[in-house]
Image (spheres, grey):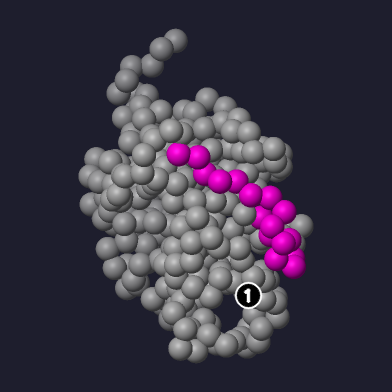
Amino acid sequence: MRLHPALAALLLFSPALARDVLLQGKGKLALWSDGKVAWEMPWGGIHDLHRGEDGRIYVQKNMREVCAIDPEKKQVVWSYDSSKSNGNEGKRLEVHAFQPLGEGRMMIAESGIGRIVEVDASGKLLKDVKLKIDRPDAHRDTRLARKLDNGHYLVCHEGDGAVREYDGEGKVVWDFPVPMFGKEAKGGHGPEAFGNAVFCALRLKNGNTLVATGNGHSVLEVTPAKEIVWKIEQKDLPGITLAWVTTLQVLPNGNYVIGNCHAGPGQPILIEVEPATKKVVWQLDGFAEFGNDVSNSLVVKP
């Protein structure tokens, strides 16, 4: 039986498919729930976002400081300022990625310094891993970075247009130069731009790596041998145009949530896709509420 288009659209956005999302836009950090802002507090732009098991929200401030926020009090209850810590005083740096590691430990990627550090809750330096950077730039050395279960670090180098995996000592053990697919680079941030300014990479359970190509307008699944075995390109999803593809999240149901930044009005800022069929099963059209610069988001329900 074929559903009427109106009924199909109703099912697509039914309450059963509701998603609670943490995100930042238009000067506020917010929880979007049941079609509205359920919680918010003033906060500037971010490039990374986590929620701890203790319910704290972890975000950046001024692209230099990592903060833990108590959502009930709407207060910062812990912070670490990379620009004032562990030998960085007076140096130009930016922080675009970090990751709570448990037991008070925090991993932080320091662009401009060209390293990943791990610190404890007091800010004591526990680990210092140098990164390979071909085109040094404090704003573009890194985007998202994650520590893997094997102790390695998977790092997106926006300026180099590459994803690199480092072992615990900083040796590059795998890399993936993001391809341009024969196209010329084109400046800008919207759908008309083009490049390989990679934003996010996730290691999948099958050993492959899922890559959000930033202004490459695509999501790629890449094998350890660097073969692209699955992809979504700019116009592959009906009625949707991918712009700056940012965060990726694999939900418990196996679906992928894709961040779609700088896409403009009439386009979703988040898209949930069923990988096997590339079917869009949910999307968040939050342009009016959050603007055109939602670079990071986190589905917290389910």
> Residue flagged by tag 1: what amino acid is it?
Val
Q: Is residue 167 magenta?
A: yes
For label 1, count other residues whose C-alpha is less than 10 Å away and answer few (under 14), some (14-19) or many (20+). Answer: some
Q: Quadrant of residue 297?
A: bottom left
Residue beneath disc 1: 117
Return the residue nearer the eye: 111 or 235: 111
Q: Residue at x 53, y 60 (%)?
A: 134
Q: Quadrant of residue 150?
A: bottom right
Relative height, residue 2 to residue 199 (above, below): above
Q: Residue at x 59, y 87 (%)?
A: 86
Q: Report the span colored magenta.
A: 165-180
Callout 1 secondary element? strand
Please name whichever residue, 113 or 56, is drawn nearer the observer in this view of the structure.
113
- Asked whether residue 224 is in view, the answer is yes
- Where residue 234 appears, as percent x and y from the top left, is 38, 34
Give residue 129's position: percent from left, percent from top: 67, 71
- The percent coordinates of residue 282 (x first, y second) are 42, 38
